[in-house]
Amino acid sequence: MTQTSKKHRIIFIDLMRAFAVLQMVQGHTVDVLLSNNYRDMNSTIFTFWFFMRGMTAPIFLFTAGTVFTYLFRLVDEPFLTNPRTKKGVKRFLLLIFLGYLLRYPTPTLVNFSNITPEEWKTFFAVDVLHLIGFGIFFLMGCIYIAEKFKLNDYVVFSVGALLFFGLYQPFAAINWLKYLPEAFAGYFYTGSGSNFPLFPWAGYVIAGGVLGSYLAKHPMVFKSIKFSYRLAIVGLLFVLAALVGNELEIAIYGHTNFWTTSPNLIFYRLGIVLFLNSIVSIIALKVENIPRIFILVGRNTLLIYVVHITILYGSAWNPGLITILDKSLNVWSTIGTALLMLTAMTLMVVIIHKFKIQNKQIET
């Protein structure tokens, strides 16, 4: 990393990373624990929570793409000699490994004789770690193509994102289990139980690369209020385009699939993500330094994700809270547990950070 990047942290990116992972923790906790009796779409509070939970993945994925591309482009070296290439490959392999490990179907590691078809289906389902891993892999591919053919980053990333967005509807309509083994079919659609197939979700990671590349090429642009305004305008244009597209869909087909399979929802969410980034960047302009805890949380998103998923959903080696408290708590008990989970995850990264510092002091 260059001296400039070390000296000038992009505060709003730190805040977005922290917000994304903490939002994910509370979202999972509430979804696991809150009784169905309180899940009322006529409630303004629950509807807002439900909407924001739907925004968690796009925020998380977009931010991951932004950070990876930003750090990659800060290093002014060719793709093959750039140290970030090796780190990206390692990150890709680690995320895929952890994704399957969290869904591993047996505690014995090698004895697969008693695994049910449903357990195999769960193991092969594609989740957010698989998705981010492949998203990083595709981002590296886009970076290589841009360098190899001397193309503009923004064009390559935009085309890449649109490819995953555009193929979403036709791919969702195909029964991929007829053509591919279950282990691969889940990467293309939700029909085999996957939560985050590559289409359209990888598009958010690649779209984040556009912002990451822009920030790397314009090191101090985030210090300008004009940058925040432009980000807000672009976000609102995406939202407007999605709403107009939804009206056209109703006019042509007589109905809307906005909240299910409509591509308009993809661009609506992307617009909201950009607008949220603009709001946070405006707030960050007023802050020279943010509390260290936000940086620590943002830097440890993978650790927080793995630990809280293991606590809530369990693994082959431990039962999760879902096995004993699945949708059984009232509102206040759920809120209290969510706050407890957020506090525990935050304390975990603080303790680990202090432990690392103490170890370094002992070694020196």
Image (tube, rainbow, N blue to C red):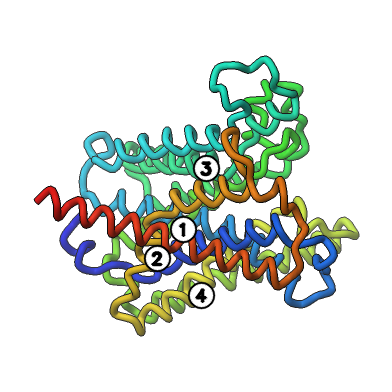
Find out whether the residues at labels 2 and 3 contact each other: C-beta distance under 8 Å.
no
Determine which residue is flagged by label 4.
232
Q: Nearer the viewer, mark 2 or mark 3?
A: 3
Given residues 148 and 209, the one toward you in this image is: 209
Residue for point 50% across, 59% down = 21
- Numbered label attached to residue 129: 3
In the rendered structure, are the residues bearing label 1 and label 2 in contact, judged by CB atoms less than 8 Å apart?
yes
Q: Amino acid at mark 1?
A: Thr
Residue receiving disc 1: 63
Could you tell me the amino acid type at mark 3?
Leu
In contact (CB < 8 Å): disc 4 and disc 2: no
Image point (68%, 33%), residue name: 122
Q: Could you tell me residue 10's position as x and y percent? A: 32, 68
SS category of the residue bearing label 3: helix
| Residue 238 screen position, x and y as percent | 60, 66
Mark nearer the N terminus (1 vs 4): 1
Residue at mark 2: 13
Is label 1 or label 4 in front? Answer: 1
Tell us which disc is closer to us: 3 or 4.
Answer: 3
